[in-house]
Image (cartoon, rainbow, N blue to C red):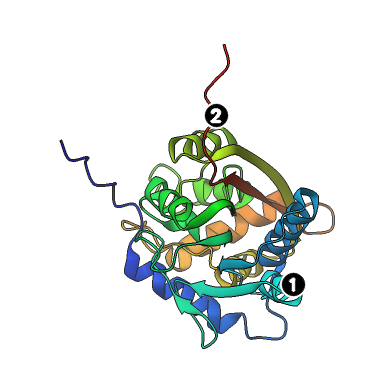
Amino acid sequence: MASAPPPIIFAPTRRRAMRARMRVLERRADAPRFLADDMADDVLDRLAFLRHRPKRALVVGDTSGVLADALTAGGCNVVRADPAPIASERPIDEEQPFPEPGFDLIAQLGSLATVNDLPGAMLHIRRALAPDGLAVMSLCGAGSVPALRAIMTETDGDRPAARIHPQVDVRAGGDLLQRCGFAEPMSDSRMLDVRYGSLRRLVADLRAQGLGNCLARPGPLLGKAGLARAEAAFASMADADGRVTERFAILTMSGWNKALRPPKF
């Protein structure tokens, strides 16, 4: 019996437009890059700890170029890709099989958070790995943007609307790795706190890093009155310095393309 298709949570056209806008905004000298830089640095730290020296790597979503440049400097042949590629990158649809398998490393930074078929995308990643290859997949997971979530809840009042993307937690990440056949699966999360002096700057940072709303059925526009309520809610949450601390929970899932060991009882 054929399996049911995954639910349509995100609109592919809106997703591509969101990332295309991000690629334009990231060219600005003052563009926020803290999420991309953190994810890239984390992958490099993991590789150093594991002493894994890939000869051929696929890097997806490395908008800052930190990871790809470091791997290239170490002698690795790096294929750079993105759902909204620039000139030096290849286009990629994470929900389709990769045309070029055999990678010693696949690093997926950020974009898996908005695919409709996450298990399918992770399965494609494992199948694109060479034997003994490693996959590291990072995204903003459960616990991210709690301040914005609270602000939107207060703004919408008795008519809550879909404005924040669903998020994957650590346990679900581990379950997905096992379900997709990864060996030595590991799922962990770390917190990154950023302080903001205005709601507009918070929203601008989200958009500039590809974290805008690309839901298939998004909530209605706020309008002037709704925006005023949101800014008032932001102000009510501010500390003595007039700032609100927003949190980004970066979920990282990693696993190997190795023969699975039978359980010991």
For the residue labelled by badge 2, is the local secondary structure a helix, a strand or a loop?
A: loop
In the picture shown, does residue 21 fall above or below 247?
below
Amino acid type for the residue under numbered disc 1:
Ala
Pointer 2 and pointer 1: residues touching (CB < 8 Å)?
A: no
Residue with the mark numbered 2: 261
What residue sits 79% from the left and 55% below the top?
48
Residue with the mark numbered 1: 70
Q: Earlier in the sequence, mark 2 or mark 1?
A: 1
Determine which quarter of the picture holds residue 115: bottom left
Where's the C terminus, which quadrant?
top right
Determine which quarter of the picture holds residue 142: top right
The label on residue 172 is none
Residue 141, horizontal then vertical, whole percent:
57, 47
Residue 166, horizontal then vertical, whole percent:
46, 46
What residue sits 55% from the left and 75% below the top?
80
Question: Gap between marks 2 and 1, in whole Å?
Answer: 33 Å
Badge nearest the viewer, 2 or 1: 2
Amino acid type for the residue under numbered disc 2:
Arg
